[in-house]
Image (cartoon, grey):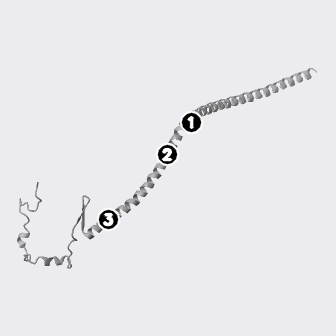
Amino acid sequence: MNKFCWARAVLEELKHQVVNEYNMQRAFSGCTLLLHLKEHCEHVYRLTKSKEAALLEAERTIQIALAKAPLVDELQNKNQELMKQIEICQESLRNNNELFGMASCTIQEFYSFSLYIGDKYENKIITHRPPPIQYRSGRYGDMKRSNGRPPMQPRNQSYDHQGSAQGDRKNYAPQM
């Protein structure tokens, strides 16, 4: 029986070792699980902090936007008023262009009519004058008017190539 007790004791010892080894493995896996949980908690903490900072920044942005909202409304109202003024100005410009077109036509018609009838308009006074003389034969018929003048003599070519003498001021306008 002694051998049996000894075998039982060895079995008990082995059982304790197996249980201890199993418990150690469980403890080790529990420790690694705890380490993973700790890392995960730190990661969640960092995310929470960054989200809190983002929320604070968003809150500041919203407060600034709410403070500027009345200014935006005022600017929109001014913009609408300016758009109305632009429409009014464009309409009056269209009307003025139509009137100017009519006025310029009438001025042009008056000018051409005054040339036709021979009137002169100066300083708000209309001076009547005779119409200009018209010759039937045109430009070349103007030679007939110079009946008393002798025909032009041909020029000497030797003098034509010399040019004007130095100091000769006959080609210049009189100086004041």
Q: Amino acid at mark 3?
A: Gln
Q: Is residue 137 above or below residue 92?
A: below
Q: Which mark is residue 79?
A: 2
Reading the image, the residue beneath label 3 is 108
Q: Position of residue 58 (x, y in %)?
A: 59, 35
Q: Position of residue 123 (x, y in %)?
A: 24, 58
* Residue that mark 1 sits on: 66
Question: In the image, 22: left or right of 70?
Answer: right
Q: Earlier in the sequence, mark 1 or mark 2?
A: 1
Q: Is residue 152 left or right of residue 102?
A: left
The crowding category of the residue bearing disc 3, from other C-alpha atoms within 10 Å (few below 14, some 14 to 19, many at least 20), is few
Amino acid at the residue labelled 1? Leu
Q: Is residue 42 above or below residue 115?
A: above
Q: Quadrant of the N terminus?
A: top right
Question: Considering only order in the chain, which callout, 2 or 3, is on the residue closer to the N terminus?
Answer: 2
Q: Please tell me how crowded label 2 is: few (under 14), some (14-19), or many (20+) other residues with Cα within 10 Å.
A: few
Please report the residue visible at 89 percent of the width from the left and 23 percent of the height from the top: 8
